[in-house]
Image: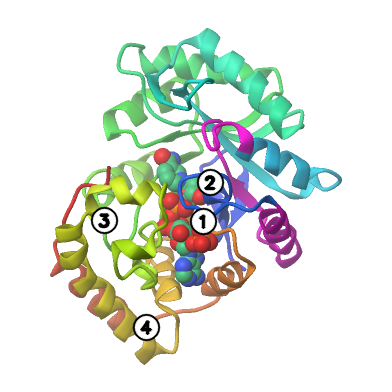
Amino acid sequence: MRTVKLGNQGLTVPAVGLGCMGMSEFYPPEDETSALQTLDAAYEMGCRFWDTADIYGPHTNEELLGRSLRGRRDDIVVATKFGIQRSQEDSAFRGVNGRPDYVRACCEASLRRLDIDCIDLYYQHRRDPDIAIEETVGAMAKLVEEGKVRYIGLSETDAENLRRAHREHPVSALQTEYSLWSRDVEAEILPAVRELGIGFVAYSPLGRGFLTGTIQSRDDLQAGDWRLDNPRFQQDALEHNLQLAAKIAAFAEDKGMTPAQLALVWVLAKGEDIAIIPGTKRIKYLQQNWQAGELQLSAGDLAQLDSLAAAHTTAGGRY
Ligand SMILES: NC(=O)c1ccc[n+]([C@@H]2O[C@H](COP(=O)([O-])OP(=O)(O)OC[C@H]3O[C@@H](n4cnc5c(N)ncnc54)[C@H](OP(=O)(O)O)[C@@H]3O)[C@@H](O)[C@H]2O)c1
C-alpha cells in the first residue's frame, strides 16, 4: 500500500485509512462485535490509520477504538477530533466550541476514552466563529508541547483560516469531504493545502455510501439513519443523483472494479498528498476499499470520469 506524507512534520499514513464513525452512529445498524472484528481485520491487513471523533456515538466510538487499540496502540495512527458539542442527556447538537480550556478538557477526555497517552492526529472538527483560530490552535500547540498530541489538523475550514492556523503552529492535515459528487475543495482548498505543504484527508469519499450503488431509494436506509435528513437523500434529489450513481456503476463494471473502488481510485488519483478514510463496519467492504489503494485508472479513464462527474450537478447540499 502506498503511504501518504501528511504535512512536513513527519506524519506518514497508509493512503487508505478507516473511517470508524458508522460503527457507532449515523448509519445504522450498529453492532459492536462486528465493528471490533472489522477493526481487527483492518489491523491485520495494514489499514492502520483510524479516524474517529469525540462526538461519534456520542463518545462511544472512541471507547470502541480504545478497546481495539489495546496491545497494539503503537502500530496505529489514531486521529480524533474536538470542537462540536453534544448534550450528555439527549445527544442533541449544541454548537461549536474552540475555547482553549475546552480544547484541553476535550483532549483529556478523548485520551481517557481511547485509553492512550497521546493522540497522533488531533483535529479541530469545526471552527468556532467566536474564538480567534490562533487561540484554539495555540491551545492545541500546548498539547503537542506536553506530549498529549503528536500532530494537529483542522476539518472543514476555509483557506484563510487554514493559513492563520498554520502560522500559529504547523498543521499536518486538513480533513474535508471530497468525492465524485463533492468537489468544492478543488477551487480553493486543495491549492491552499498544497501551497502550505499540508496533507489532505478526504472524508466521505464514497459519498456517504451513495456512490457505491447500494442506495437506490430511501427505503434502503433504516429508520434513524442520518442520511434520511440529508438534503442529497431527499426524494427528488436522490432521484436526480441516481443518474450519476448509475454512470459510475457502469464505468466501474467496464473497468472490472466495484463502484466503491472506482470512487476511491478517483480520489486517490487526485494527488500523492491525499489520504482517504472510507467508512465501513463490514469486513467485506473494508477489503474492497483497501484493495482500491492498489488499483489504477489510466489518465484517459480519469479524464473521462472527471467529465462525467462535472456534467452532473449534484442535487442537494452536503449538509
Ligand atoms: N470531519 C468531518 O466532519 C467528517 C464528516 C463525516 C465523516 N467523517 C469521517 O469520514 C469517514 C468516512 O465518511 P462516511 O462514513 O461518512 O462516508 P463514506 O466513507 O463515503 O461512506 C460510508 C458508507 O458507505 C458504505 N460502504 C463502505 N464501503 C463500501 C463498499 N465497498 N461497498 C458498498 N458500500 C460501502 C458504508 O456501509 P456500512 O456502514 O454498512 O459499512 C457506509 O454506509 C467517517 O467514518 C468519519 O470517520 C468526518
Q: Mark 4 vs mark 3: give the one in front.
A: 3
Please tell me which of labels 1 and 3 falls first in the chain: 3
Give the Cα separation between the discs numbered 1 and 2. Answer: 7 Å
Q: Can you tell me whether the CB of the residue at mark 2 lies under 8 Å from the nearest atom of ligand 1?
A: yes
Give the Cα separation between the discs numbered 2 and 3. Answer: 19 Å
Q: Mark 1 vs mark 3: give the one in front.
A: 3
Give the Cα separation between the discs numbered 4 and 3. Answer: 22 Å
Residue under numbered circle 2: 21
State which quadrant residue 291 falls in: bottom right
Residue at image point 45% right, 83% down: 257
Residue under numbered circle 3: 233
Residue under numbered circle 4: 252
Q: Can you tell me whether the CB of the residue at mark 1 lies under 8 Å from the nearest atom of ligand 1?
A: yes
The crowding category of the residue bearing disc 1, from other C-alpha atoms within 10 Å (few below 14, some 14 to 19, many at least 20), is many
Give the Cα separation between the discs numbered 4 and 1. Answer: 20 Å
Q: Nearer the viewer, residue 153 or 45?
A: 45
Residues shaded magenta: 33-60
The answer to whether 107 appears left or right of 175 in the picture is: right
Please tell me which of labels 1 and 2 falls first in the chain: 2
Q: Nearer the viewer, residue 109 or 196?
A: 109
Q: Which residue type carries mark 4?
A: Ala
- Establish if 277 lies above or below 311: above
Give the Cα separation between the discs numbered 4 and 2. Answer: 26 Å
Please tell me which of labels 4 and 2 falls first in the chain: 2
Residue under numbered circle 1: 279
